[in-house]
Image (spheres, rainbow, N blue to C red):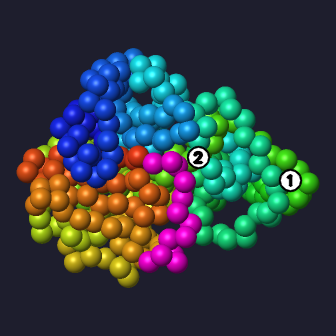
Amino acid sequence: MDVKVFHCLIDALNVAGCCIYNDSIPILYHSLIKLQSENHFNSVYLWGRIETSSIDYYVAYGHQKDPIEDKIFFYTQNMLEWDIMPTDWSTLQTDMVRKIKTKFYGNPRYVEIIGNSNKKSQETTEYAISPNVELVFGEEGEEEDNNNVDSLKYDDIVSVTEEINEIVEAESALIDDPNLKLSIKEEDRLAITIKMIENESHIVPRGYFYKLPNGTITKAPYFKGLDYSEIGNEKNFLHINQQYCQPKGQKNDVRPDFNGSIDFLQSIDKDIPKGCWASRLFSDRYFIIHNLLWPGALYVQDMNTGLHGYFYNGYGLKNLDLPFMI
């Protein structure tokens, strides 16, 4: 939720069940403006709040250029000082976080011990959330075209493949050892959890982002939110993570009013399981759509002003029983 409209959507958040103390609103606003100034961000957003057993985490992010790929996340507990979120973690740590079913303790330095009684899940439906890695092969000092596969050599591919296989085998051996006790710092767990929630539940209305002919993504300057005829259609809500939600089978599944400049992200109507989004309109004014897979993730819009935003307010736990509840 953009800090510029945060105070205007407090009533909508209260209606949605995300209660923020009135005394905290000006503190959060001024600290976020300071965060934006110190890091020279074009925009800064209050992402949400992770509820813990003691002191809650407030999460925010900002970006300088690309509003999708260049996001930098921060967290705070005193609403005044913001710490940058860790960005480097392994597949083993990601698997550990998926196994944790307890609330956050509320201490970033707290180390959680996880018993390894369950083997690694064999499901492959989870999307990778590790940072992007781009491999470029070529001679030293030569500028390479990332899309030119002709420059790849067989030995290079075999070398990289063998190295990746060795890492996967080593991590699999650790994961499958039932006698091994695994540990993870809560700060790392927080970062991985937020990335998971961000990938699967952060949405924006269709038309909010605009893709220029040169590939640059920017906010549409005159976008005023969705109207009453549009909010009831899930195709008008798009995932914000471009890598996670690239359109698939676009040639065979194109909406009648397809516009390449705004339809470069995937809509939520194809999300699995079917029915994981629930929307409602309060008092013919506040539109709220909830993500049932990550309870606490929601999108709100004031129909009178067109102001809107995404917010998360929950324990950071995924509802894995949702397919049996729908």
If the image is split into quadrants, where does the N terminus sit?
A: top left
Specify whether 55 is left or right of 312. Answer: right
In the image, residue 149 lies at what x, y percent?
62, 59
Say which element carries label 1: helix
Alpha-carbon distance for marks 2 and 1?
A: 25 Å
**Which residue is at a point 40% across and 53% down the rendered structure image?**
297
86 lies left or right of 111: left
> Looking at the picture, which amino acid does disc 1 mark?
Leu
Q: Main secondary structure of the magenta part?
A: loop
Q: Which residue is mark 1?
A: 174
Q: Residue farthest to the left?
A: 304
* Labels 2 and 1: the sequence-earlier one: 2
Name the spot of residue 314 as percent of width and height, x first.
45, 48
Q: Residue at x 61, y 37 (%)?
A: 105
Choose top left, top right, bottom left or bottom right for residue 6: top left
The boundaries of the magenta stretch are 314-326
Instruction: Indicate which disc residue 103 carries.
Output: 2
Q: Is residue 233 left or right of residue 246?
A: left
Residue at left 68%, top 32%? 110
